[in-house]
Image (cartoon, rainbow, N blue to C red):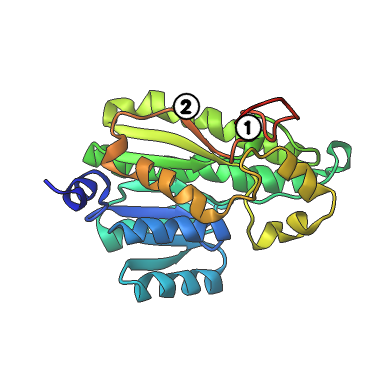
């Protein structure tokens, strides 16, 4: 068997259906395109209809299959309606990617209750109930992969991210609960925790004179991450190549946790 055949056998998503929340965002959209490019039919879910239509066109222009589904993860009725619509169109859901998320950078004592509730509702509560709605369809097929998009803040913490960090730590814990409870149905659950990723929403941070230096000093690879840097891990966890992987966190951070930029040291290398 040649290289192409081996890779196709391991990583192909042909015949698979993915429900993707947060598909209108920079990271979500890129990951959705990656899974569609591997042969999956992708249900793009978000509250931003314009962004969904744009991503759908990109996927279809590249030869992929996608549909746009309006989904507000803060509303149970919207979740149930969207999940049923995806199943009605494709007959099943094999892979769920929980990527919907928001943040508002402010000090812990500056956070008001409305902000706290909204971040919690989208980042953690939304992922919980979308997963709860999808799981019975995976159980029926005795197969499924849930991929939750976590954050650098599940480990080292940035200032001004108290609520966001709490939701992502909660999401990691939720991932492990899914892995333990749903393993008997051959449903796997894993978490991808991106590091400092450059998207349209973080351009301001990367352009900031002190914050960008702070970040680069802590990244061993000495560059921002980009959404496409996360794509390979997402494909791995969506595919049968990861059939014995569940309950794990994958950090895609350019070497933040391992120590970042080294201090000056003597070497002949």
Q: Nearer the viewer, residue 54 or 204?
A: 204
Q: Which residue is mark 2?
A: 176
Q: Nearer the viewer, residue 105 or 195?
A: 195
Q: Position of residue 243 (x, y in %)?
A: 28, 33
Q: In this rendering, is residue 199 above or below 214? A: below
Q: Secondary structure at mark 1?
A: helix
Q: Position of residue 20 (x, y in %)?
A: 44, 54
Q: In this rendering, is residue 202 above or below 265? A: below
Quarter holding the C terminus? top right
> In this image, 98 relative to 16: left or right?
right
Instruction: Estimate how packed mark 1 is, as few (under 14), some (14 to 19) or many (20 or more) residues with alpha carbons within 10 Å.
Output: many
Quadrant hosting residue 6: top left
Q: Earlier in the sequence, mark 1 or mark 2?
A: 1
* Residue at x-position 84% and y-position 54%: 209
Q: Position of residue 101 (x, y in %)?
A: 61, 50
Instruction: Estimate how packed mark 2 is, as few (under 14), some (14 to 19) or many (20 or more) residues with alpha carbons within 10 Å.
Output: some
Q: Position of residue 265 (x, y in %)?
A: 72, 26
Q: Which residue is mark 1?
A: 154
């Amino acid at each position: 068997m040649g290289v192409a055949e081996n890779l196709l056998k391991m990583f192909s998503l042909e015949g698979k259906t993915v429900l993707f929340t947060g598909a209108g965002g920079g990271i979500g959209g890129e990951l959705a395109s990656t899974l569609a490019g591997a042969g999956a039919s992708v249900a793009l879910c978000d509250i931003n209809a314009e962004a969904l239509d744009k991503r759908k066109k990109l996927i279809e222009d590249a030869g992929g299959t996608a549909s746009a589904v309006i989904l507000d993860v803060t509303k149970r009725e919207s979740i149930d309606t969207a999940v049923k619509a995806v199943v009605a169109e494709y007959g099943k859901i094999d892979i769920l990617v929980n990527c919907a998320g928001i943040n508002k950078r402010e000090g812990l004592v500056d956070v008001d209750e409305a902000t706290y509730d909204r971040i919690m509702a989208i980042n953690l509560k939304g992922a919980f109930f979308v997963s709860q709605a999808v799981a019975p369809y995976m159980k029926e097929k005795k197969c499924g992969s849930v991929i939750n998009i976590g954050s650098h803040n599940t480990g080292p913490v940035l200032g001004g991210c108290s609520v966001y960090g709490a939701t992502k730590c909660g999401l990691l814990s939720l991932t492990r609960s899914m892995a333990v409870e749903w393993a008997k149905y051959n449903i796997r659950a894993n978490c991808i925790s991106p590091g400092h990723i450059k998207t349209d929403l973080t351009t301001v941070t990367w352009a900031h004179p002190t914050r960008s230096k702070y970040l680069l000093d802590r990244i061993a690879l000495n560059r921002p991450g980009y959404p496409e840097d996360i794509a390979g891990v997402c494909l791995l966890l969506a595919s049968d190549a990861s059939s014995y992987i569940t309950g794990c966190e994958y950090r895609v951070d350019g070497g933040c946790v391992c120590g970042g930029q080294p201090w000056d040291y003597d070497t002949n290398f």
